[in-house]
Image (cartoon, rainbow, N blue to C red):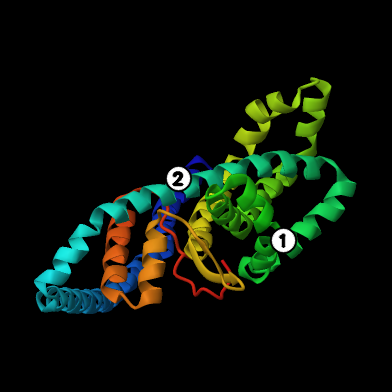
Amino acid sequence: MEGLSEFYAGAARPLRAVAGAVRRAPVVRSIQVVRRRSPPGRGGGRALDWALRAVGVALLVLIVYGAADVITSTRPSTWAYLLSQTWPILVGLAYDYARVAAIALVSFVIAVFLGYYLATHRRAEAVGVPLTLALAALPAPAYFPLLFLATSAALYRALGGLANELYVVSLGFVSTFYYIFYSYWMGLKALPHEVNEVMDNLNMGFFTRLRRVLLPGTMPYIVTGLTSTIDSAWGGLMIGEYWPQIAGDRTLEVTHGVLKIMDVATYEGNIALASYASLLLASWWWSSPSPSPGTCWRSRGGST
């Protein structure tokens, strides 16, 4: 019996080796097939990559040629006039950044307080959220002249020229505040209910909740909402900084603003100044880390 056991044990070893080789063979063949078929795919991807590069180079050449043609065909007197307008354009840019900062700050403060109140009071939420949605659906240029007509007499009597700034900032605000408001409100609604229970059990005050829980917990929503708010605020400024005949023969106009310079130049047919201001503005946005406005180029009659 011991001899038979040794015989079968010795015969089993080569059988296991053969079975293992048979099981591994299809894997090796499949790997070889993949290796043989992969080079044609890589070649097609490289061809597409080179084609896209060629298109990009061609577009770059056309842009450089067009820019050089415009520069060389412009008269020196025109360049002297445009260069003399550089400082007013930069000053106007600083004013516009201050206006955008004011719009973003006011929108954020209102979103923090109003969003929390609506998120914690269901009856107010049932009325406030649809009402805000209805306001956001209306383009600001459609109803803002009515607000201007109803309040301009009192505001100009009380504030004088500062009323223009108030109107422009208000137009930018109503054009864009709902981005941060809805983002923050949705962030609060996304918080687990247990978080609110813990804050209630700890008797945390409103500002303590903001500092320790609500603002850190909704930070991704806040960043998204503020980015959209800042981006869209430029659209309201583009409309409001120079709005001829906003109510009858009255004109809404600020003293300083790069968008006002572009608006007035376009309205008067001074395409050279409008293009030069656009070039400086685009160069600044390209070199700065701040969000680039995506809506300020919309038409005057469109929604911001």
| 165 vs 214: above or below | below
Residue 188 x %, y % = 71, 42
Q: What is the secondary structure assignment of the residue under circle 1?
A: helix
Q: Earlier in the sequence, mark 1 or mark 2?
A: 2
Q: CA distance from mark 1 to mark 2?
A: 27 Å
Q: Quadrant of the C terminus?
A: bottom right
Around disc 2, counting alpha carbons within 10 Å, would you say few (fewer than 14), some (14 to 19), or many (20 or more)? few
Around disc 1, counting alpha carbons within 10 Å, would you say few (fewer than 14), some (14 to 19), or many (20 or more)? few
Circle 1 sits on which residue?
A: 150
Residue 34 x %, y % = 33, 71
Looking at the rendered image, the disc whose residue lies closer to the viewer, 1 or 2, is 1
Left or right of 1? Residue 48 is left
Residue at 34% x, 55% y is 285
Circle 2 sits on which residue?
A: 98
Left or right of 289? Residue 39 is left
Residue at 82% x, 26% y is 200
Q: Is residue 143 visible?
A: yes
Residue 99 x %, y % = 48, 48
| 176 vs 7: above or below | below
Question: Residue type at mark 1?
Answer: Ala
Q: What is the secondary structure assignment of the residue under circle 2?
A: helix
| 235 vs 202: above or below | below
